[in-house]
Image (cartoon, helix red, strand yellow):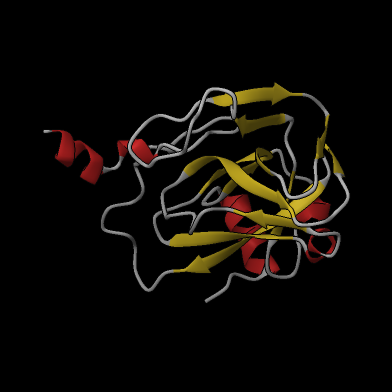
Amino acid sequence: MIVSDTTLKELLRKGDISIEPLEEYQIQPASVDLRLGRHFMKVDENSEESITLDSHLQYVEIEQDEIIIPPNSFLLATTREYVRLPDYLTAFVEGRSSIGRIGLFIQNAGWVDPGFEGNITLELYNANRLPIKLKSGRRICQIVFARMDRRAEKPYSGKYQGQRGTVGSRVFKDREVKDNIS
């Protein structure tokens, strides 16, 4: 079941969910708007011949208040907010409709698992023919919380737990990669 604004406010007040920093205007009827941070990453195209799932990928890090995403380009970004979920809620991140209507696709790779805490890394893709200029602090996406039928037996404690800022892919740390190496 999706969590309503009334329940979100109650969970925030009790400290079951933590979203810091948070302004009242960010709370929507069934979600919380998250704002763009000022830390970005893009694949270092000059140091990579190709991208594989088995090795560490080199990124160029950018820290600034404004960024321009060229047409047909991909960029990692972060939310300003640090989010903490209890073991009985999951969440997913969606782009805001107003942002999608200008051709910016915003993705968060999969669910935000119960027990996760950290800044949310966003995958941004400019599907437009024009560059898109973004400013830190603007509402860019929304996080929707859903109650699980019971508490997670094993809340999230994976490779992105506690992440701060934008974090690149850690797919090379997947179990099957390690198993193949041994």
Residue farthest along the left direction in this orientation: 182
How far across and how far down the image is residue 85, in percent?
A: 49, 50
Residue 136 seen in render:
no
Q: Quadrant of residue 128?
A: bottom right
Q: Does residue 29 appear in this view?
A: yes
Residue 161 in the image: x percent, y percent?
42, 38
Judge from the rendering whether residue 117 lies leftward or rightward of residue 95; answer left or right.
left
Numbered disc total: 0
Name the residue rendered at 80%, 42% in the picture: 70
Instruction: Please state, as top left, top right, bottom left or bottom right, where the C terminus lies in the image.
Output: top left
Rendering coords of residue 14 (x, y %): 56, 51
Q: Is residue 144 above or below residue 2?
A: above
Foreground of the two, 45 or 91: 45
Is 7 above or below relative to 19? below
Q: Quadrant of residue 56?
A: top left
Residue lying at 55% horizontally and 51% vertically, measured from the top left: 17
Front residue (pair 128, 159): 128
Residue at figure coordinates x 76%, y 57% from the top left: 127
Q: Position of residue 63 (x, y in %)?
A: 72, 23
Question: As rendered, which of 43 and 118 lies closer to the eye?
Answer: 43
Please, which residue is most extreme toward the front here?
A: 49
